[in-house]
Image (cartoon, rainbow, N blue to C red):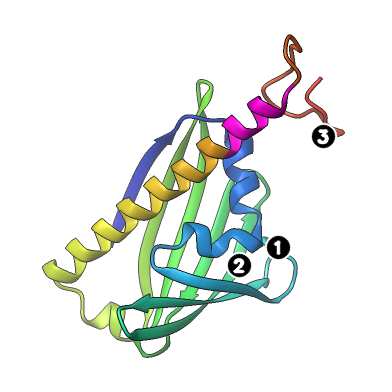
Amino acid sequence: MAVRRHLIATSPRTVWDVLADGSRCADRLVGASSSEPVRGQWPRGGAAIRYEVRLGPVRLPGETVVRHCEWGETLELEARAGALGTVRIAVELRPWGEECLVIVDEHPLRGAGGRLRNPVLEALTRVRRRAALAGLAELCEAEAAAWERRRPLGQVVAREPGPNGTRV
């Protein structure tokens, strides 16, 4: 498949907080109608989330397992989609000034997805990945804006939480 980059107008910490919230998987997965934890504590290694993607009347179950996590920087996943096989998804977060550069590297590992690679499938994957990154950006920027609205007027705080989680 390929590598895609997206600049999100918020800090890497905010983006990581959204990615690390396993309960929001359906919010950031294109086409997902539901998601639930299966095992472990997301995003620790071995943790898994089950989800369902709906394409019209068709319901496709899937599961995503955390294969590697460097807290706040890198999240490597294996997404299983039944007969379609599995895909490796690596998400890297880089500070870019006061924003976050998100780099997603996605490649088929096993099953039909790896064997059926063709230009049409590649184009559909690019569209889905672009939509997923745009959705992630929207979630993260909304999260940052909501935090700003909750902040008392006139209070000057750090953009990033300190070691104890406070922003003072």
Q: Is residue 7 left or right of residue 13?
A: left
* 46 in the magenta segment: no
Mark closer to the observer (3, 1)? 3
Magenta stretch, main secondary structure, is helix
Element on which disc 2 rests? strand
Residue for badge 3: 165
Q: Residue at x 57, y 72 (%)?
A: 35
Residues at marks 2 and 1, CA–CA distance in whole angstroms: 7 Å
Classed neighbour count for the residue bearing mark 1: other residues with Cα under 10 Å, few (<14), some (14–19), many (≥20): some
Q: Residue 161: x percent and y percent?
A: 75, 29
Classed neighbour count for the residue bearing mark 2: other residues with Cα under 10 Å, few (<14), some (14–19), many (≥20): many
Q: Going by the picture, which residue comes out furthest to the right?
A: 164
Residue for badge 1: 44
Vertical position of residue 52 compared to residue 32: above or below:
below
Q: Are marks 3 and 1 in contact (CB under 8 Å)?
A: no
Q: Nearer the viewer, residue 25 or 98?
A: 25
Q: Amino acid at mark 3?
A: Gly
Q: Amino acid at mark 2?
A: Val
Classed neighbour count for the residue bearing mark 3: other residues with Cα under 10 Å, few (<14), some (14–19), many (≥20): few
Q: Nearer the viewer, residue 116 or 40?
A: 40
Q: Residue 154: x percent and y percent?
A: 73, 9
Element on which disc 3 rests? loop
Vertical position of residue 142 compared to residue 49: above or below:
above
Q: Is residue 157 left or right of residue 137?
A: right
Residue 66 disc label: 2
* 144 in the magenta segment: yes
